[in-house]
Amino acid sequence: MREYLKFYIDGAWVDPAEGLKTLDVENPATEEVCGKIAMGSAADVDKAAKAARKAFATWSQTSREERLEVLGRILAEYQKRFGDLATAVTEEMGAPSSLAQRAQVPIGMGHLATAVEILKTFKFEEDRGPTMIVKEPIGVCSFITPWNWPLNQIVCKVAPAIATGCTMVLKPSEVAPFTGHIFAEIMHAAGVPAGVFNMVQGDGLGVGVPLSSHPDVDLISFTGSTRAGIEVAKNAAPTVKRVAQELGGKSPNIVLDDDAFAKGVGRGVATVMTNSGQSCNAPTRMLVPTKRMDEAIAVAKEAAAQVTVGDPNGNSQLGPVVSEVQFNKIQKLIQAGIDEGATLVTGGVGRPEGLDVGYYVKPTVFANVTPEMTIAKEEIFGPVLSILGYESVDQAIQIGNDTEYGLAAYVQGADLAKAREVASKLRAGQVSINGGGGDLMAPFGGYKMSGNGREWGDFAFNEFLEVKAVLGYAPKEAAE
């Protein structure tokens, strides 16, 4: 049983400011309590924000070399805790141990290593004739991160913030809080100066709202649902702080009518099922030529049948979804698909056979889905795929773009030139062609109600920087 009952503020582990209030953390594979955390308040947020503000005065003035040294130490400590982090991810949100070890934990290391490489050559100053353009750290940043890829979302914010000279307050998800606590231990062990990194556990009302509205916070970076993101923006508005958001998605996957059709369908099914479908960029709307719908159904059914579900500490590809709340939401949406007349190819409501305990969901595929159906519009956040038909590529693009979201999109096809043409017409922040992915330098973020701003790589650095123009910087004779 884990007990994380302190917060990390100003370089030390401290008790909650208003007395100890705790929240039980449930293991979604067993439905049993596996730990508890302290729940923070506005007073804890205020203490952390003030520590970050104080530390900003000196941290913002550090050299490139000093920040590189600190990032290197963080990476080294992170590597030491690899096994602890992997165990925590599996325990707190049900990720299979294989996924934790090959993706969930390594991607955090990847963001740290990427930040190091970018920082080595990043240009914080640029001469433009008589004017010097200077990029300076924005200030105190607050981070509200989700449970589905906990380390990815923590580190892709923290690493560039550290690199650019910002200070910060992190609120990890209270649903999956263990990794956030271990990450704070890593920052402490790495000798990050006091106040540069602070961590307060808690829920949205107790910690998220004060973080979003605190006058000492200059930027809030939020990852989560569009509904919650709207509230964060509202709370941030009175202080006119910068708001960066990575929100929901309902990503289209256009499979072109060519010889790579079966391969594209199979790849699409496998991608949706990864992480039990709990990825905001999952390609949950597959678009196939109507005349090949029967073929798509056969391929998708076979691909889904290959996906094993079970104990995340075993050899299964899918563990449980994160919570009872999430399980019930997914079940309701699967039932909506059935009730609205979509063809249930495989899966459906209820747990997989033999799994009576744990929030396990059947890998589910619907076909003959139409754009107005609930499962074609709402983000399900589970291992559920909807297959829609199209009569022409232009119609596929129109259907693909017919969503309030715009986080990601996918194109599958043997003709690369044609796939590129389709990709150019999709309104999404990231478009993957034939399974292309894994580029930590590629900007990640969305159009429309999928958010604003970009994470990952050098684009992330710019989110944490203000731009100053120093006019008359050059000597008068040089300017002339």
Image (tube, rainbow, N blue to C red):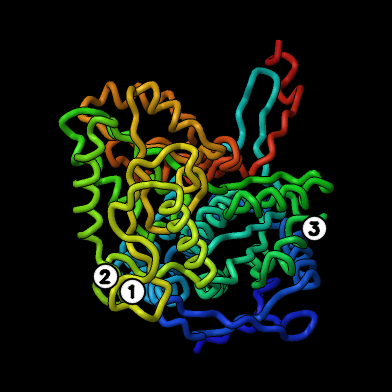
Mark 3: amino acid = His
Which residue occupies 70% across, 15% down? 479
Does 69 appear above or below 16?
above
**Tags 2 and 1 in contact by the CB under 8 Å rule?**
yes
Task: Return the mark for residue 316.
Answer: 2
The tag earlier along the polypeptide, 3 or 2, is 3
Q: Position of residue 418 (x, y in %)?
A: 28, 22
SS for tag 1? Answer: loop
Foreground: disc 3 or disc 1: 1
Q: Give me the C-alpha separation between circle 2 and circle 1.
A: 6 Å
Q: Residues within 10 Å of mark 2 (few under 14, many from 20)?
A: some
SS for tag 3? Answer: loop
Mark 1: amino acid = Pro
Task: Return the mark for residue 214.
Answer: 3
Nearer-the-camera pick, 13 or 305 = 305
Mark 2: amino acid = Ser
Q: Position of residue 166 (x, y in %)?
A: 65, 53
Q: Position of residue 469 (x, y in %)?
A: 72, 29
